[in-house]
Image (cartoon, rainbow, N blue to C red):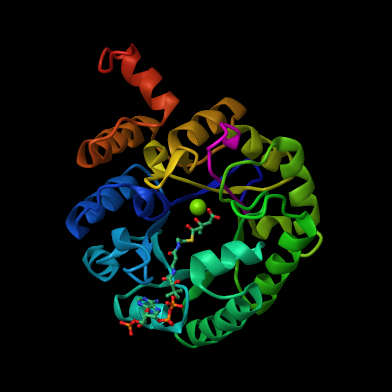
Amino acid sequence: MPLDHVRLVEVGARDGLQNERRTLPASVRVQLLEHLADAGLRTLEAGAFVSTRWVPQMAGTDQVLKALPSRAGVSWTALVPNVQGLEAAIAAGCREVAVFAAASEAFSQQNINCSIEQSLRRYQEVIVRARDAGIRVRGYVSCVMGCPFTGQVKPEAVAAVSAALFGMGCYEISLGDTIGTGTPAVTTRLIEACSQVVPVSALAGHFHDTYGMAIANIHAALASGVRTFDSSVAGLGGCPYSPGATGNVATEEVIYLLDGLGMSHGVDLDALIEVGEFINAELGRETASRVSRALLAKRGRLHIQ
Ligand code: HMG
Ligand code: MG
């Protein structure tokens, strides 16, 4: 793959929708995912096999996966927190899953009810079972530039968890700035630390845009050699329980940045903006993508106050 190509992992139907106030039925989530694939996205998180008591928005992920047609070159993936989730993913026909650890003890306890060490032991089991079933596993590390409960997180702590997941067999490690507090200089230091233990070609950036730094952080990560980024159409997400929190960086913003840099990505921006309009109507919300707002306004389809 040429160095000027960027791979996008579309997480709107999972990370975005898991944080929306309105829970969408499986049929609408399937339509969203199919439209996103039509727009050119090739790796798409379709949901999460987690406890519906913890994340009710992800109920029916099995129905979503079962309804999605297999498409050449398209990978529909799902989050799994344990072997129970993996078995459900396999039963639904999923061929790729993601496990999710954290670089902060407090966040690990809050998110998956166990310590970092316990989570890594669970993921070891998940990866062994996934390998037997011929399923690819991606690894997430959350809180890479800050924890909502304990503040600062050291790059070395992130590197240690990244190395453990990569060593177990995750093909890629996605570095999650869960609360969006990171800045470009911190991003550069983070990639420097993680690329000592995981090849930079196997690192991905997962930036939430809470402080408006996501695009700047992606630019810094690109300069450090990262070529895979996670994003959500229309910047879906935000937390109903945390005023002011926003979602992932909008996929539209990433495409606009990459176009400006002359880097290829394979996504049709106009088609993507239409997908954003579709899902915003379903959710009863405005787009969080400034690129989308600007281009729709230019075409007279959005009145900016
Ligand atoms: P627990 O309560 O410790 O689990 O939760 P347990 O093993 O004690 O089981 C309790 C109940 O949960 C049992 O049901 C199990 O069957 C059930 P009961 O007998 O009481 O009826 N259970 C499950 N149900 C469905 N699917 C499963 C599953 N496992 C057990 N896989 C657990 C532990 C991990 C399940 C829970 O904490 C959980 O589901 N957490 C998920 C949290 C989550 O999804 N967070 C969001 C994703 S991470 C993220 O967004 C960050 C990321 O975007 C990167 C970034 O931005 O940083 C990836
Ligand atoms: Mg996230």
- Along the line of sight, which residue is nearer the eye, 40 or 49? 49
Q: Determine whether 17 is above or below 218 in the image.
A: below
Q: Is residue 87 left or right of residue 202?
A: left
**Residue 285 pos. (x, y %):** 28, 34
Work out whether residue 293 or residue 106 is closer to the camera in this orientation and state it. Answer: 106
Q: Is residue 212 magenta?
A: yes
Q: Count all numbered tags in the image, as a single digit.
A: 0
> Residue 144: percent from the left, percent from the top?
66, 54
Asked if residue 215 is among those painted magenta in the image, a careful observer would answer: no
Q: Based on the displayed image, in which of its 4 quarters is residue 119 positioned?
A: bottom right
**In the rendering, at what x and y percent does residue 45 appear?**
40, 58
Whether 61 is drawn above or below 129: the answer is above
Q: Which stretch did the figure color magenta?
A: 204-214
What x and y, as percent, mark residue 255?
49, 34
Kindly indicate the quadrant of the structure image that contains residue 289.
top left
In the figure, 132 relative to 238: above or below? below
Based on the displayed image, in which of its 4 quarters is residue 159 positioned?
A: bottom right
